[in-house]
Image: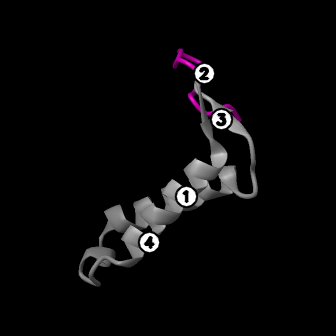
């Protein structure tokens, strides 16, 4: 099973829009800063990529998204 990376990029863009649309009070906490960092890290992984991401079952030393 695979997920098109373009779809992942679209989803990450929507999450970014959601974070930008939050009220200023919600942007002051540590959770918001951690969410922005996580989003930036995911966008780095998928920037300019095409094709499919292969989903693999998690094991002790293996993550879902291959490095």
Q: Residue at x 53, y 15 (%)?
A: 59
Q: Distance between the residues labelled 3 and 1?
A: 14 Å
Q: Is disc 2 surrounded by few (<14), some (14 to 19) or many (20+) residues within 10 Å?
A: few
Q: Mark 4 points at which residue?
A: 17
Instruction: Mark 4 vs mark 1: give the one in front.
Output: 1
Residue 48 shown left or right of residue 31 in the figure: right
Q: Mark 3 to mark 2: distance in Å? A: 15 Å
Q: For the residues marked 2 and 1, what is the alpha-carbon distance in whole angstroms?
A: 25 Å
Q: Which of marks 3 and 1 is nearer the N terminus?
A: 1
Separation of residues labelled 4 and 1 (CA atoms): 11 Å
Mark 3 Cα shell of 10 Å, populated few (<14), some (14-19), many (≥20): some
Helix, strand, or loop for circle 2?
loop
State which region is magenta: 56-67
In the rendered structure, does residue 13 fall within the stretch colored magenta? Answer: no
Secondary structure of the residue carrying tag 1 is helix
Q: Position of residue 47 (x, y in %)?
A: 71, 57
- Give the CA separation, mark 4 to mark 2: 31 Å
The residue that disc 2 covers is 62
Q: What residue sits 29% from the left and 84% below the top?
A: 24
Q: Which of marks 4 and 2 is in front?
A: 4
Instruction: Give percent across and percent down for residue 21.
Output: 35, 78
Residue farthest bottom in this picture: 24
Q: For mark 3, what is the residue?
A: 53
To which residue does mark 1 refer?
Answer: 10
Which residue is nearer to you in this view: 42 or 48?
48
Answer with the quarter of the image where residue 52 lies.
top right
Mark 4 or 1, nearer chain start: 1
- Label 3 – label 4 distance at C-alpha: 23 Å
Vertical side of 10 occupied by 54: above or below: above
């Amino acid at each position: 099973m695979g997920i098109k990376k373009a779809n992942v990029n679209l989803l990450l863009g929507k999450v970014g829009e959601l974070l930008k649309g939050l009220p200023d009070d919600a942007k002051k906490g540590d959770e918001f800063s951690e969410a922005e960092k996580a989003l930036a890290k995911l966008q780095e992984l998928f920037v300019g990529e095409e094709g499919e991401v292969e989903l693999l079952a998690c094991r002790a030393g293996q993550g879902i998204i291959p490095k």
